[in-house]
Image (spheres, helix red, strand yellow):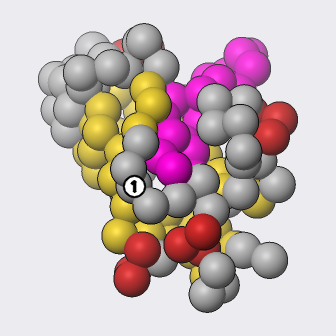
Amino acid sequence: QVQLVESGGGLVQAGDSLRLSCAASGRTFSIYNTGWFRQAPGKEREFVAAINWNGGNTYYADSVKGRFTISRDNPKNTVYLQMNSLKPEDTAVYYCAAGGSQLLSVTDYPYWGQGTQVTVSS
């Protein structure tokens, strides 16, 4: 069992940066692939970025490629999402998820955090 807690969201202006953190409890977190997903009002939850269990492979949605960076610190049981050059269309609730084998699939992750709001004003 893994519990996930996201933090770092907030209200920023277009062009600004934020770093989201996903802190996990459970000593087996380091074996889990981890992903970030987001959900804007009235839209389905969508894939943003994912990292495999040892950090050796990362994956990004085309909409964030080159602007967002996912990373993990397994000794600290934490995964990060560095978001640069934020745009208003990045506004959403961002969720951390762990345990997926199909890293890009929202339906494949058994463990989810409660989400953190990111709002980007123009």
Percent x, y of residue 99: 71, 57
The residue where tag 1 is placed is 55
Q: How many marks?
A: 1
Please name the residue shown 47% across and 77% down the image.
77
Q: Is residue 39 magenta?
A: yes
Q: Nearer the viewer, residue 86 or 111?
A: 111
Relative side of 99 to 56, left or right: right
Q: In this view, does 51 lie above or below 73?
A: above
Estimate the x, y position of residue 6 in percent, counting from the top left: 52, 61
Main SS, magenta region, reads strand
Q: What stretch is highlighted in magenta?
A: 34-52
Q: Where is residue 3 in the image (x, y as percent from the top left)?
A: 70, 74
**Residue name at image x 42 percent, y 12 percent:** 62
Q: How crowded is mark 1: few (under 14 residues within 10 Å), some or many (20 or more)?
A: some
Report the quarter where the N terminus lies.
bottom right
Residue 114 seen: no
Towards the viewer: 95 or 59: 59
User: Would you say residue 65 sits in the magenta stretch?
Assistant: no
Please state, as top left, top right, bottom left or bottom right, where the C terminus lies in the image.
Answer: top left
Residue 68: tell me if it is visible: yes
Q: Is mark 1 on a helix, strand or loop?
A: loop
Position of residue 42 in the picture relative to residue 82 (left or right): right
